[in-house]
Amino acid sequence: MIERLVVFGGTGDLTARFLLPALAALRAGGHLGERLSLTGASREDWSTGRYREWAADQLDRHGGDCPAEAMAWVGASARYLRADVSDPADVAAVVAGDGPVAVYLALPPALFPAAVAALHRAGLPPGSRIVLEKPFGEDLAGAQELNRLLADLLPEQAVFRVDHFLAMATVQNVLGSRLANRVLEPIWNSTHIAGIDIVWDETLALEGRAGYYDTVGALKDMIQNHLLQLLCLVAMEPPITLGERDLRDRKVDVLRSVRPLTENDVLHRTRRARYLPGRIGDRAVPAYADEQGVDPGRRTETFAEVELELNSWRWSGTRFRLRSGKALGADRKEVAVRFRPVPHLPFGHGGEAAPNVLRFELEPEGLALDLTGIGTRAHELAPLSLTARMDPAELPAYGRLLLDVLTGDPALSIRGDEAEQAWRVLEPVLSAWERDLVPLEEYPAGSDGPAPRFP
């Protein structure tokens, strides 16, 4: 296990809300030894003492029910160095030390190329690893160039392009439900499944993230990475093992099988929108264009929907709909598998049977199955729902990812060719949207989003 962790962007929101609590959870679970050291690096002119005070405050705010001893240990093990991530001399001073180091780039994606180039010039000890957050690149060409820079720095197995969705317990349960239950896998195909909706709708609005979000939008922020990753797990062929090669090969197969979108497809199978003023619960929400830090001229979308088809034996004829929106009236975060109706109902005038739907609920984590049964009157059909709540995972998603980084297991990270294929899928959408071929619709904050357009 690597015993040195360096976080560039060590004073940022990602470190405060996720990485520090993840380290505390790892410590509490007995996964970290006494020798692990944490170095935070950023532009702030702080001392190590100031950094430890800040880390303790952030752990108090975001550490949840993690034991106080574990949170205190994280703070005490940290040190701080002021550094410009694009300066090879600064970077070399931060990563200097005995033995390999895990370098976490908790930075805006636009800084990745400069940071990787500085690390290359500074040099990393043998056995080191690097971690990058999504989105990986800004388009296909950017992802390819970043892959070239990374290949000059470290071997592919030492590069961790992380997506915390892959470490969520319910996401992992998609594979568990499919591959460990005979009742599901034989019907996991287009013969029985009409469509699969992969949805991340949230009541949260911009929440002060204009500096990042207004340059990215819903398509790049959610669909290009998180939701395409869920598509891979839902649609992949059963791997031989869950080792990094077998699992990632099957995920790449899914992305390669996505039917290329023509310009006409983009016009009829994608949509974008942004929110107008409205109310979400008891709070008033301004229009996105009026949020602080937003440039209305960018026409950034806060809602994106894309319908895809796969060119594969298993999935020909099944529709996959990926959707994400902000400032909506209700949170809906799920993978909904919609089965085809039965061919015949022998119940006379007892009503209609709604299609069965299997829902993997992502937040809060759970599982639900919508069925049809007999109601209180004989031969009268009525909806029936079976639900299950999952026990909390031992580790939070970022705890699982950090443990994989430190122990060297890249199975849940995104391989370079996979990152490029994800951009290939959406390149036609990005191009058409940039040329305003698809209208930018609007919806009131607190609503269900733009009116349904797809059948």
Image (tube, rainbow, N blue to C red):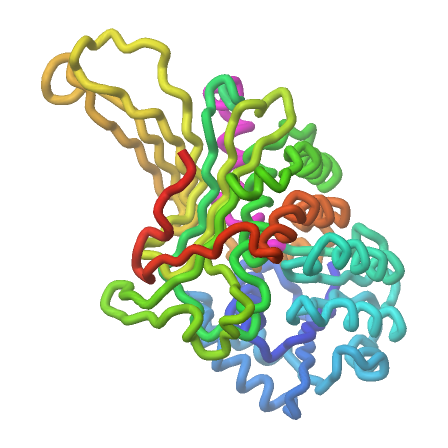
Residue 367: which quarter of the image?
top left
- Label tally: 0
Q: Position of residue 156 (x, y in %)?
A: 81, 51
Q: Position of residue 427 (x, y in %)?
A: 67, 48
Q: Using residue 72 as the reference point, say whether residue 117 is left or right of it.
A: right
- Nearest the viewer among 443 and 375 is 443
Q: Specify the segment rendered in magenta.
A: 163-186
Magenta: main secondary structure: helix
- Asked if 101 appears above or below 10 in the picture, the reply is above
- Asked if 45 appears above or below 77 in the picture, the reply is below
Q: Position of residue 32 (x, y in %)?
A: 63, 63
Residue at figure coordinates x 59%, y 22% from the top left = 314
Residue at figure coordinates x 41%, y 51% from the top left = 363
Residue, far left: 377
- Nearest the viewer among 108 and 240 is 108
Residue 151: which quarter of the image?
bottom right
Q: Position of residue 333 (x, y in %)?
A: 41, 48
User: Which quadrant is the N terminus positioned in?
Assistant: bottom right
- Nearest the viewer among 199 and 3 is 199
Residue at figure coordinates x 58%, y 32% from the top left = 309
Magenta stretch: residue 99 in it?
no
The answer to whether any part of residue 159 appears in the image is: yes
The answer to whether any part of residue 393 appears in the image is: no
Residue 236: which quarter of the image?
top right
User: Which quadrant is the C terminus positioned in?
Assistant: top left
Q: Using residue 195 as the reference point, say whether residue 350 is left or right of it.
A: left
Magenta stretch: residue 170 in it?
yes
